[in-house]
Amino acid sequence: MNAGKRASAPRDLLVELGTEELPPKALKRLSVEFASGIFNWLKEQGFVEANTESESNQWQWYASPRRLAVVIEKVISRQGNQVIERRGPALAAAFDKDGQPTRAATGFAGSCGVEVGALETLKTDKGEWLVHRSETPGKLLNDVIEECIVDVIGRLPIPKRMRWGSGDAEFVRPVHWLVVLHGGDLLDANVLGVSSGRYSQGHRFHAPGRLNITSAARYAEILKDKGSVWADFEERKLEIYLQVEKLAAKLKGQAVIDDVLLDEVTGLVERPESICGRFDEAFLEVPTECLVSSMSDHQKYFHVVDKSGSLMPFFITVSNIRSSDPARVRTGNERVLRARLSDADFFWRGDLAHTLESRLSELEGLMFHNALGSVADKTRRIVEIARKVARQVEGDVDACARAALLCKADLVTAMVGEFPELEGIMGRYYAINDGETTDIARAIEEHYRPRHAGDALPAELTGRVVAMADKIDTLTGIYATGEEPTGDKDPYGLRRTALGLIRIIIEDGIDLDIAQLVEFSAAQFERQDIKVSRQARQRAVAFVVDRYPAHFAASGFAVDEIAAVGSVRPLRPLDVEKRLRAIAAFRTLPAAVSLAAANKRIANILKKVDASIERSMDFDRLVEPAETALAEQLVRVSSQVASLVQRSDYDDALEVLAGFRESVDRFFDEVMVMDPDPSLRDNRLALLMQLSGLFMGIADLSKLQSTERSQ
């Protein structure tokens, strides 16, 4: 449909959904999705006039604990008239040789309610057709805004919706008010059981009650001035950042402001008021990570460090109210934190009374997976895998085995039981206390890395070995149970696990074969009477290999380069990177375009060939000089290329293969592959199969698009 002339002057549109306190961690994403969804919906329907500068400047999202909102500029009250175009029969079929309408033409005209003479002609590159065009009035914004909001809310990323009251409405939290204003005019809508009005709600404590929003354009201003609410999430976030930094400076320290925590705190308050507090210095004897976890993860406080990065006995909290008695607020927060830190201190001192090794028996009672045994069973498998990998990478076998043995022991400590996010970290502290080497202690902590995209890898080889052993055990085991990821569901985080394994292997230059790792891991399950089928092993390997494109695309390799190498399904990640680097260099050579085109041509020819055709080439059946020259060159360099590929010297191998340019071009210019004589045809196909196989030992060059790197 094409929009005709629009009939109304544009004005700002406000949509605000008022709720009970929304999940702070999800608030920012919910708000952006809500706002962008409404903007895009209205734009697609022709209600938003284009901004000559930037679409991103045309709408503003707002979010606080009790509201999601958007203000969109240049929204019209009625769509332009809609021209509906209906295509009929082709012109050649619409009229006979005398120029009279056929039944196809009259039937089409009748279905449109017009005479044939009222139809128009549509000309395209593919021909001419009869067409009927009609114009219908555009819809009113007031008539579609409810549909828009309901549709957008239904598509929000809410994992679990809730119901409230006696109705059947569902949302992340109960909804209590809805404001929909076009300029200063109220639009009619009923969403989630709530009818639209012009009244929002101010701050729950500083400005309780209804707040009249007189115009969409003044929404944020009215909320701040009269409602004591900073509706702009980013403005509120910056204010918190500045307040926290200012208080830390007064303490002669520096606040550690994590972006994730800052977003969460911003999602907890509508009017930020930061307050600093203090805790007993005696608690500094407890590991720093325990104290920080108590403050940031559990209490949403920002901790403070000195110039050397050491933790100071202070914290900064952000309150949602401006208290008339700040000291009382400070004292209350200090009391809560004191209790939390006292627990951490108690757990720490209690755990120190037992070595990690003495806790290994307790892992028997901790289930890893009901089909894969206990954590103790997993530990025994990891130890054997770590020994195997350590030998392959020339690591310290005994250190790797020891670290693997102890790597899960801290899971049964009191500290990790209370603070699960400290797994591995506490293992390092307890290992050092037990007299284990620094290398082993660090490996216990770092074997969980990388925990997420962009996370650091284990710093030392021992940690990398144990990390790989742990990850390959998890991958193989879950595939043995048949619970591999499907669609968006990945309950065991196997995608993250596989990418972490790939990163460790590649970034640390460890040359390991994924299939061999899975086979050895499966053998450890078999020793524990846990069956891992051949199909499960193959799927586990394929799952890791299928993660290559995501990793290498993030590393800057072109899509077609990744496809070219991926086609030959290499099983060693480090080898894949070597091939990719060689392909990236090869495509800059003068011969690259010609050979890529030749490989495409060869691939297309061989697709149509019976797989039973003999692959061995007979020199006695070579009759054309061009095919003889190509065959002789193939024989001459095959062993050289095979030797280079065997050594993973792909750069030199491709340089040798680039020498085929002239003979391959000549072959296709002078030789008819699909000769009527079956003897000649099959022999030429065998020649092409051997040539293709030589290239495919490195990559499928037919996947390369051009000498330009396609991102």
Image (spheres, rainbow, N blue to C red):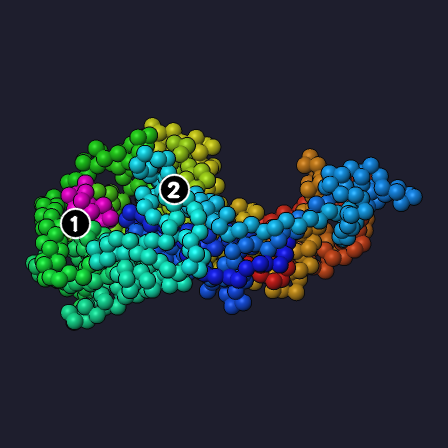
- Residue holding disc 2: 192
Residue 526 in percent (x, y) is at 36, 31
Say whether residue 461 is magenta. no
Disc 1 residue type?
Tyr
> In terms of image quadrants, where is residue 6?
bottom right
Residue 15 in percent (x, y) is at 41, 53
Q: Of 409 and 285, which appears nearest the observer?
A: 285
Q: Residue at point 77% right, 41% down?
A: 109
Q: Of 125 and 98, which appears nearest the observer?
A: 98
Which quadrant would the C terminus be assigned to in this image?
Answer: bottom right
The span shown in magenta is: 412-428
Left or right, 241 with reference to 329:
right
Left or right, 252 with reference to 582:
left
Q: Residues within 10 Å of mark 2 (few under 14, many from 20)?
A: many
Disc 2 residue type?
Leu
Q: Residues within 10 Å of mark 1 (few under 14, many from 20)?
A: many
> In terms of image quadrants, where is residue 330?
bottom left
Give the numbered dot on residue 430. 1
Q: Of 217 and 53, which appears nearest the observer?
A: 217
**Is residue 63 visible from the viewing direction of this image?**
yes
